Image (cartoon, helix red, strand yellow):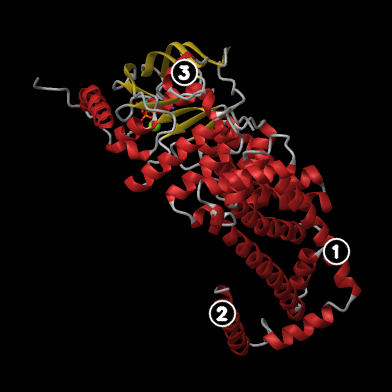
């Protein structure tokens, strides 16, 4: 287990000096329209971004601005039309890098496997000792609050629980970079805050870099070291906010003044972009 | 299990209708259920019957094996290849909808009188539904499952075995169920029209000789076999769908 001591990176200040893990340079993504002759859809870019080893980076942006597209580029699931994406110094170019775990926006739990087998699936390609395997599965089950449901099938679970199965399935592989695409979209606000605490715990324990896409501004403000704000499609980064939280934060920081200031700044940056994305450009001042 | 009560009712109803019809039509064309069972018991005690049975079982087994093997591979191949499936799917649907009996002369000419053409006839009945169902099922696998497999570094073989196949299984199984029945029909038709052996030949022969006892007994056996096999497959199929 890559249990880096939490003291190694006690604050954002230290994280800033840490190594760059992911870098995007002048990245654009266009999709060809299915009908022949149609012009391409410019979904994303140009984007320049560096993710530092071990940081918690959140992305917010209006619906359809290219957040999931950005995540797929970093995961190596799709290739940039222009520019370069690199993970740990090596260009990705549509090859799936090792050490990256993804939790998708849609439910990706396998209905034909029990919760336990779903989670074990993450480990099937890894050569690890059976005892270690069981230990990882048990601890992921416990962490996601699924121990009592280990033998259940996804069809018997709620949407939020299925999403937790997917998080656990990614966790057991102990990725160095965890990509989360609106993993709590299906949860109510209270559970969402508590799951946020779990993600913070897991981030602290594993020392992994977390890249979280969310549409909830408060979630981004509470969880991240840095928050990237995206424009309406084609998505570009229009602001990057450093939150300055300490590494051992939890959901109680929502009561702090700084929290209000961060969400307010997020909303200022996003308001006009969100209006654009629903087809209503800003009228007044 | 909820289904059994209804199945029982249906069987009893069928027996009653059968009995009434036997009384009404008379023994020129029908036997009563009891007479049929008695004759069937006598029939299955003869070695001649088992000779024909073995012949049919062998032909059906081979035809089914071929239909499943070809259907699954073709289905996966086409399901994974959008272009090929766009070209070939309409063709398969067209072939599926023509009565296969029209192909029989061609098959007879190519395979001759014997087990090969029976097997071929069984296979062409079963292979198309298996292909079409598999193709549809593979194409309908949710992209997020495939992405999950790719992130985990699965190669094509693992992807098919551990994600595509189980994800598509409920629908593929439906195809296998339909394919099973159609292969059986195809094999028997093959035996009826161009064979000197097998249950299909026996049945055709009995019709020619107007041996009502034998017709009834054979039909009874075939219905019994096809009925129970279908029910079993349907039961398994439902269990698969419960999870999805
Ligand atoms: N495979 C594709 N083919 C064509 N266009 C696509 C494809 N995937 C995404 N797009 C387009 O790219 C744009 C960005 O999509 P994306 O899914 O990245 O948005 P998003 O920010 O994740 O939205 P949401 O918040 O609703 O999840 C959208 O306009 C979408 O229509
Ligand atoms: Mg998205």
Q: Is residue A154 visible?
A: yes
**Tags 2 and 1 touching, CB below 8 Å:** no
> If you read the primary sequence from the N terminus, does the residue marked by circle 2 or circle 1 appear first?
2
Q: Which mark is residue B5?
A: 2
* Whether labels 3 and 1 share one chain: no
| Quadrant for the N terminus of chain A in the image | top right
Q: Locate the C terminus of chain A and report the quarter of the image it occupies.
A: top left
- Within-10-Å neighbours for mark 2: few <14, some 14–19, many 20+: few
**Secondary element type, mark 3:** helix
Secondary structure, mark 2, is helix
Which-is-in-front pick, marks 2 and 1?
2
- Residue most toward the right? B47
Count of marks overlaid on the render: 3
Residue picked out by circle 1: B54
The image quadrant that residue A43 belongs to is: top left
Task: Kindly report the distance in space between the C-alpha atoms of the residues bearing marks 3 and 2.
Answer: 71 Å
Say whether residue A77 is visible: no
**Residue B13 shown left or right of residue B198 in the figure:** left
Figure check: A272 above or below B237: above
Q: Which residue is mark 3?
A: A14
| Front position in the image: A167 or B188 | A167
């Amino acid at each position: 287990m890559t249990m880096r001591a939490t003291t190694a990176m006690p604050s954002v200040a230290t994280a800033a000096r840490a190594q760059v893990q992911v870098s995007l340079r002048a990245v654009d993504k266009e999709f060809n329209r299915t009908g022949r002759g149609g012009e391409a859809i410019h979904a994303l870019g140009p984007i320049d971004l560096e993710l530092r080893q071990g940081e918690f980076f959140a992305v917010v942006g209006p619906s359809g601005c290219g957040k999931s597209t950005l995540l797929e580029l970093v995961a190596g699931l799709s290739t940039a039309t222009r520019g370069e994406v690199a993970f740990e110094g090596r260009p990705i170019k549509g090859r799936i890098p090792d050490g990256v775990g993804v939790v998708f926006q849609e439910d990706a739990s396998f209905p034909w496997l029990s919760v336990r087998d779903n989670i074990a699936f993450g480990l099937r390609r890894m050569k690890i000792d059976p005892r270690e395997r069981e230990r990882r599965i048990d601890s992921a089950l416990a962490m996601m609050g699924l121990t009592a449901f280990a033998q259940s099938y996804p069809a018997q679970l709620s949407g939020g629980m299925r999403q937790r199965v997917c998080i656990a399935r990614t966790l057991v592989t102990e990725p160095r970079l965890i990509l989360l695409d609106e993993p709590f979209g299906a949860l109510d606000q209270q559970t969402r805050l508590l799951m946020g605490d779990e993600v913070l715990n897991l981030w602290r324990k594993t020392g992994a870099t977390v890249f979280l896409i969310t549409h909830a501004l408060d979630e981004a403000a509470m969880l991240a070291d840095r928050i990237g704000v995206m424009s309406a499609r084609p998505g570009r980064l229009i602001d990057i906010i450093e939150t300055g939280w300490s590494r051992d934060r939890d959901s109680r920081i929502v009561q702090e003044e700084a929290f209000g200031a961060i969400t307010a700044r997020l909303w200022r940056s996003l308001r006009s972009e969100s209006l654009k994305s629903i087809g209503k450009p800003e009228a007044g001042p | 299990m909820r289904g059994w009560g209804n199945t029982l009712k249906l069987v009893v109803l069928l027996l009653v209708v059968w009995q009434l019809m036997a009384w009404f039509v008379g023994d020129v064309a029908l036997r009563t259920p009891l007479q049929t069972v008695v004759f069937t018991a006598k029939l299955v005690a003869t070695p001649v019957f088992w000779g024909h049975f073995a012949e049919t079982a062998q032909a059906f087994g081979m035809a089914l094996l071929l239909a499943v093997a070809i259907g699954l591979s073709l289905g996966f191949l086409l399901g994974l290849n959008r272009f090929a499936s766009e070209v070939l799917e309409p063709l398969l649907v067209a072939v599926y909808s023509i009565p296969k009996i029209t192909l029989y002369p061609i098959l007879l000419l190519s395979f001759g009188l014997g087990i090969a053409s029976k097997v071929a006839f069984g296979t062409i009945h079963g292979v198309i539904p298996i292909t079409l169902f598999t193709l549809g099922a593979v194409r309908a696998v949710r992209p997020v499952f495939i992405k999950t497999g790719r992130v985990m570094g699965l190669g094509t073989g693992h992807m098919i075995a551990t994600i595509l196949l189980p994800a598509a299984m409920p629908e593929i199984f439906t195809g296998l169920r339909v394919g099973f029945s159609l292969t059986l029909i195809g094999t028997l038709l093959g035996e009826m029209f161009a064979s000197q052996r097998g249950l299909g030949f026996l049945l055709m022969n009995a019709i020619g000789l107007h041996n009502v006892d034998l017709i009834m007994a054979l039909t009874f056996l075939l219905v019994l076999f096809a009925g129970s096999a279908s029910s079993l497959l349907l039961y398994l199929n439902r269990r698969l769908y419960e999870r999805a």
